[in-house]
Image: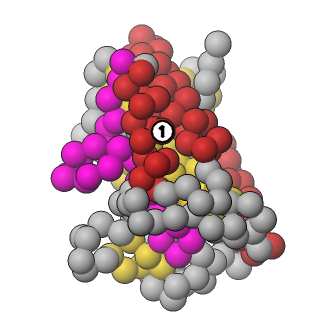
Amino acid sequence: MISLKNPQQIAEMKEAGRITAEAMAAAVEAVKEGISTWDLDRVIRHRIENCGARPTFLGYGGFPGSACISVNNEVIHGIPSRRRILHEGDIVKIDVGAFYRGFTGDMARTVPVGRISEEAQRLIDVTRESFECGAAAFVAGGRLGDIGSAIQTRVESEGFSVVRRYVGHGVGHELHEDPDVPNYGTAGRGPRLQVGMTLAIEPMVNAGTYEVTVDRRDGWTVRTADGRLSAHHENSVALTEDGPVILTAVYD
Ligand code: MG
């Protein structure tokens, strides 16, 4: 069941989103050659806890980190590790949520480490642009398929592919609420988009095949099946009377 939020609840979600975005900003600033993904996770955890919030991902389904940190061919759900050191040319995906006063935020960014390849930069740019296309299609009276279709069209026009196995989702009191929000689909299909919906719109874009594998040993890390690069861009977005509003942003 899709839970609609009233303006007061959306205002409260903005607070959780602001803390999420502040933790992200701190992590992005800390990304540099030689840092471990565990160190980045500590930066995120401290920032969230200093705001009086709690990292939503910590313990979620047994996840051991405060954030998912995935490098290069890792798509999502990378586990922070002291042994995972960032090197120049890497792209690192940081996925984080802060739980605050009953609501959570959820956002992801892909960050370059020093100088990166032209293809890696293009992948990051197209992924962000595809998010913007998806968010722009999140309008009252539209259909859920409009969002996925807008994302898929942008991504595939650049020769990249959209991950099928993992999708965006509703977000609110819970990290994962109804509905699923695929990053692919057919415009004009699916549930009607309504004011009060709050969605995590999150294209996961691969340079090569959209097929992915899950690490058998840790049970979490999702990688591209062909070993090529992947990028991720996510925000929690509310549909208000004034149109879509990004919740995971820093507002004054
Ligand atoms: Mg998400």
Please say whether residue 67 is one of the residues in the magenta stretch.
yes
In the figure, residue 100 lies in which quadrant?
top left
- How many numbered tags mark residues here? 1
Q: Quadrant of the N terminus?
A: top left
- In the picture, measured across the screen, residue 125 lies left or right of residue 225, that is right
Q: Residue at x 48, y 71 (%)?
A: 74
| Residue placed most toward the observer, 112 or 168 | 112
In the figure, residue 167 lies in which quadrant?
bottom left
Residue 236: where, in percent of width, then height? Answer: 49, 37
Q: Residue at x 34, y 36 (%)?
A: 55
Q: Quadrant of the C terminus?
A: top right
Residue 39: where, in percent of width, then height? Answer: 46, 49
Q: Which residues are magenta?
A: 52-77
Residue 225: where, in percent of width, then height? Answer: 45, 85
| Residue placed most toward the observer, 201 or 116 | 116
Q: Residue at x 56, y 71 (%)?
A: 72
Q: Please give the residue where the numbered disc 1 appears in the rendered image.
A: 43
Q: Residue furthest left?
A: 62
Identified by mark 1, the residue type is Val
Q: Residue at x 55, y 55 (%)?
A: 35
Whether residue 160 is visible: yes
